[in-house]
Image: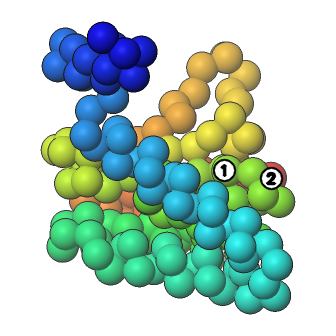
Amino acid sequence: MSAESKATEKNQRNTSSGEGFSDAERAAIKERAAELRADARRSRSADKAAADERDVLAKIAEMSPPDRELAERVHAIVTTAAPDLAPKLWYGQPAYYKKGKLVCFFRSGHADKERYSTFGFSVRANLDEDDGMWPTSYALTELSEAGEARIRDLVKKAVS
């Protein structure tokens, strides 16, 4: 058996036993690779920020209705609360960057086959609490006025 055949067989075994990447994970990796290629092409474009935001809005428009509504509201909250954050796709989902570094993101529950969507923060978010413990992501099934206010406050704190 050739080395290539052995590698293919091992990959198939790992995937079926749960040790390899799932189809959804492989799709996310491919989306991320495509995002990086597009980013490299756009780095030469004067219109990069506008193109990145168009990609985010197009991705939101593709989402199923409950996730789309949440993502649209989150996008409006984040871009209003922290206009210096730049919208950009991250693993095929809306994300927001400051000086090229990921600060926060939205993950579609439907795309992840979960019962809720997620709004989360990266390690670059300034959310550290005095007691050494703080949440880094939130489950979203709906967004009340209080929820919107909380996201707005967290985003402002994250970029401070």
In this rendering, does residue 122 appear at all? yes
The amino acid sitting under disc 1 is Val
- For label 2, the residue is 160
In this rendering, does residue 140 appear at all? no
Residue occupying image coordinates x 74% and y 88%? 47
Q: Position of residue 22 (x, y in %)?
A: 27, 33
Q: How many marks?
A: 2
Q: Is residue 117 left or right of residue 113?
A: right
Q: Position of residue 20 (x, y in %)?
A: 32, 21
Q: Is residue 106 above or below residue 41?
A: above
Of 85 and 11, nearer the camera is: 11
Q: Earlier in the sequence, mark 1 or mark 2?
A: 1
Q: Is residue 149 above or below residue 109?
A: below
Image quadrant holding the N terminus, namely top left
Q: Is residue 117 above or below residue 60?
A: above
Q: Is residue 128 above or below residue 53?
A: above
Of 53 and 156, nearer the camera is: 53
Describe the element under mark 1 as helix, strand or loop.
strand
Q: Is residue 112 left or right of residue 90?
A: left
Q: Is residue 72 left or right of residue 100?
A: left
- For label 1, the residue is 103
The amino acid sitting under disc 2 is Ser
Label 1: few (<14), some (14–19) or many (≥20) C-alpha neighbours in 10 Å = many
Describe the element under mark 2 as helix, strand or loop.
loop
Q: Position of residue 61 (x, y in %)?
A: 32, 80
State if disc 2 and disc 1 touch (CB < 8 Å).
no
Residue occupying image coordinates x 63% and y 62%? 37
Picture quadrant where residue 59 is located:
bottom left
